[in-house]
Amino acid sequence: MHLRSSGVRRRLAEDREREDTIDLHLMSASATAAERAAVDAMLGRPESVWEGGARSAVDGHVAFGGYHAAARRRHLLLPALQALQGEIGWISPGGLTYVSERLGVPPAEAYGVASFYALLATEERPRRVAHVCEDVSCRIRGGDALLAALGHRADVVPSPCLGQCDRSPAVLVQRAGEDDVSLWGATPEDVTRYLAGAPRPHRDAGEFGVPQTVDRRSELRLLHRVGAVDPWSLEDYRASGGYEALARSLEMGAAAVIEEVKRSGIRGRGGAAFPMGAKWEAVAMSGAEVRYLICNADEAEPGTFKDRGLMEGDPFAVVESMTIAGIAVGATRGYLYLRGEYPIANRHVAAAIVAARRAGLLGDDIAGSGVAFDVEIRIGGGAYICGEETALFNSIEGFRGEPRQKPPYPTEAGLFGAPTVVNNVETLLNVPMIVLEGGDAYARIGTPQSTGPKLFCLSGAVAVPGVYEVEFGATVGDLIEMAGGVTGPLRAVLLGGASGAFIGPDLLDLPLTFEDTRAAGLSLGSGVVMPFTTEADMADVVRRIAAFFRDESCGQCVPCRVGTVRQEETLHRITIGSPNGSRRRDVALLAEIDAAMKDASICALGHTAGTAVQSAIALGLIGGAP
Amino acid sequence: MTASIEITIDGRSVGVAAGTTILGACRSIGADQPTLCYLENLTPVNTCRVCVVEVAGSRALVPACSRRVEQGMEVRTDTERVRHSRKMVYEFLASSVDLSLVDDATRDWMTRYGVDPDRFGPPAPPAGDRDRRNAGHHADPALDAAETVAQPVKVHDELYVRDYGKCILCYKCVEACGPDAQNTFAIAVAGRGFDARISTEFDVDLTQSACVYCGNCIGVCPTGALMFRSEFELRKAGVWDESAQTVTRTVCSYCGVGCNLELHVQDNRIVKVTSPLDHEVTSGHLCIKGRFGYDYVQELGDDLATTPIDVVLASVRGRDGAA
Ligand SMILES: Cc1cc2nc3c(=O)[nH]c(=O)nc-3n(C[C@H](O)[C@H](O)[C@H](O)COP(=O)(O)O)c2cc1C
Ligand code: SF4
Ligand code: SF4
Ligand code: SF4
Ligand code: FES
Ligand code: FES
């Protein structure tokens, strides 16, 4: 790459010198003072004309930067674009050009990145925009009505699942120059108030509770602090046992920690169910000088909100768990990749990181041990696919969130090409327990093949939606009962999220373990249990799932990019009753589309994009027998 | 790289050098596989998925163009699963993209797999907004038509046109413009999902972008989406005739690098210029002079134009000033 010679860059430099010849297009493409200030606040002030700064005498003689400097700064692209979005409300040609100059990223590539994310606007739009959830749970619990009540306005757009399915309808009000506001149980008046600029509401600690903590706190291992311990207070965290595990792990040493994690038998909670110990060991043994730990908090699987609960209600536990993990695998830097729709979790975890750093629990010398580790939060831009671990790497590195073909696996070549451990928030939050109680004790919880406690996200047609913690082994029916039962005659349960499958009432006795779901041809996914009653318009729900995959496909590979479109079209024809030929033909076509997406796509988004649709057809959820 | 790796392809034992791709191994025994996004002189991006094969032990199919061989690998290239996925990939593309100018090999594979794009319904009419769609949002699908990428051709200068209704998003042009050849980065993939597209920043015209008109993107485009303006106009006028063309190999006369040119000549007129992919100097890539600067060897002008070809070429050159 030879970024210095990019045409736009050259022209800009020329234009500054020969103002009389600036053409209109380029004039409109220079950044305003406010745009420069927004970007500079993120990147620091430019040091030379080569970085978009003012010309100084030395600039005529020395070229700063160059390819390597630019490559090192590329990872700041998304944060810089987010700075523009956050302050200005959109990414204008001038703003984008300035970011490109500052970072040495070709404008076409910067635009490719900006236009990839749903929370970044590349056309001017209102400074405050309400993203109103239209996804599976909200649409049957008031989201559709809310959207209808708000009517057609430029500052209201429908949104995929906002991770607040336990408190539908959910809204994210994205605002330029002001705090974003996350709303739940939202009314049209709430939405219009925050669209009009009302300050972000103050939330007290009690709001980050889970229904289960009320009467059964003593039995909870993962949720015991959520809603009970002040998420802002390091003292309270410590008083409730926090940071004991870090101290213990430093005494034990990395190898012993990994040994306990392996003995615990814990598998990942993010969807792929990969043994955590094996991942850690691979990175720990890699011998690479640079390694990374990533906590995957992108949580965008429709119906999933457990990680939000953990981050809002127990943010120090996230930081402590990442610290133990990072040190164990030999990483000195950890990233928390947090979805952009979680402003509250962001504030809580960011505050916890600052407090931990002040207390010497992050930084160059953790708790006096001489070991270094620190955590940086990276905010997503509104893209479900960026939860896929390799897409997540590309997103952090400043590229489009397109997954990479595996192999190589992240443990060999992950973030910035270095061996990387990626774990889900919930997975990581088991680590303190494993360290303190030992892997063997942990392995006795749950079933032999599915060890430990597990969080499930109950939403949809249940009386008391929320995050519920059980030991592995609880059945679908048990969980629904914990959530107060179904609100009407049960028609089907969506298991595992949009990438999971529908099951019928006959499977209520299915234990939700890795082995039992696998034997039934299902997957636990991210722990979603979403019942629907006979009242629900199932065709509409399944169409929404198909639309979701079409919207969220990164577009890289043909089977998924076009397959998700053809799936949605065919499904619409079937459900609306005007099949192309016959219903039987269209149903067969859907199966063929699914098979190709499953077999030939690059990543698991494509592999699972047809799963829910196929299960819905098999169950007769969309109009009679297949 | 001398270590030999033994694998089997459809039951046949094959020994190839370590680092070879499955595709390379297949080709070494004359068992070619279909490809669209693969090209010898570019880094494999494995996005089209038309080359997928079955590899024992792998749950999903594997792209032959990028996956390197491993000792003992068992590869199957003609199973029901492979045929089905390849057929679907071609049908997905043929139902959404204008494939009228793909090469004969692709056409043969499509015939072999029984591709029938009409299964998804008739194509929807062209869209005028593909460069302005927002990630994460789309309109409800039409009930009686299959969405396509059809859109107006971008004709902005006299050198080449971009007809993204023919674009299969193979990423080749982006690679050729970027790190694999030109290092100009004038174009990139923008947008997401089905709305992903090749674009300059904010879709500005090429003349206002970083483009230096090397034409290397044209050289690698497998579908005719990127095309010399001369070819585009000659096709439009109905006088483009490849069977009447000769291809003459020569050396570019502009500088001392020694790039080989292939002059495509019809009716004694140069109608486009390419460079051989396997040429050691160019790997198929040229600069603006070699690619487009050939008019000095042929005198064109409204008053001199006599043949239909001359009339078209003169009109191309006349547009927007001198060529
Ligand atoms: C489309 C897609 C989205 C994903 N989103 C998430 C996510 O939001 N959070 C997560 O932990 N894992 C997600 N995953 C799974 C990750 O790729 C990865 O397997 C996981 O983070 C590993 O952590 P674990 O082993 O602790 O489960 C997603 C996978 C796919 C294919
Ligand atoms: S399967 Fe879908 S999301 Fe995954 S790489 Fe392919 S297009 Fe992108
Ligand atoms: S002509 Fe050359 S510089 Fe211009 S877009 Fe194509 S490859 Fe890039
Ligand atoms: S324009 Fe041509 S080379 Fe570029 S992505 Fe499209 S089909 Fe491929
Ligand atoms: S927040 Fe609306 S469905 Fe999840
Ligand atoms: S040729 Fe292999 S994926 Fe395109």
Image (cartoon, coloured by chain):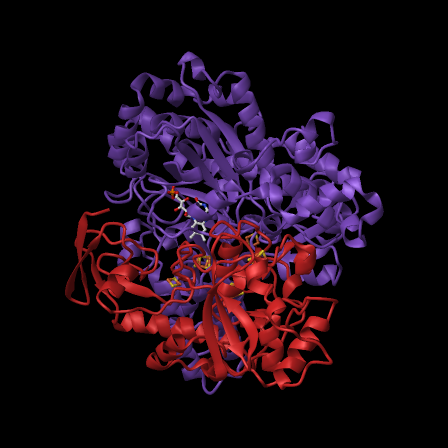
Q: Is residue A397 left or right of residue B151?
A: left
Give the vertical position of B167 relative to A398 (above or below).
below
Colour of chain B, in one word, is red
Residue at the farthest right position: A20
Image coordinates for residue A215, horizontal then vertical, percent: 47, 36
Q: Quadrant of the C terminus of chain A?
A: bottom left
Residue at image location 42% in from the left, 49% down from the top: A526
Give the vertical position of B47 relative to A596 (above or below).
above
Q: Is residue B51 left or right of residue B154?
A: left
For the image shown, how many numbered marks are present on the structure? 0
In the image, B65 versus A618, the foreground residue is B65
Q: Is residue A136 left or right of residue B156?
A: left
In the image, A386 versus B284, the foreground residue is B284
Image coordinates for residue A123, horizontal then vertical, percent: 71, 55
Residue at the farthest bottom position: A581
Image coordinates for residue A200, horizontal then vertical, percent: 71, 38
Q: Is residue A316 left or right of residue A169?
A: left
Residue A447 seen: yes
Image coordinates for residue B45, horizontal then vertical, percent: 42, 56
In the image, B206 versus A371, the foreground residue is B206
Colour of chain A, in one word, is purple
Residue B160 seen: no
Residue at image location 38% in from the left, 29% down from the top: A325
The quarter of the picture where residue A625 lies is bottom left
Residue at the farthest top position: A368
In the image, A53 versus A610, the foreground residue is A53
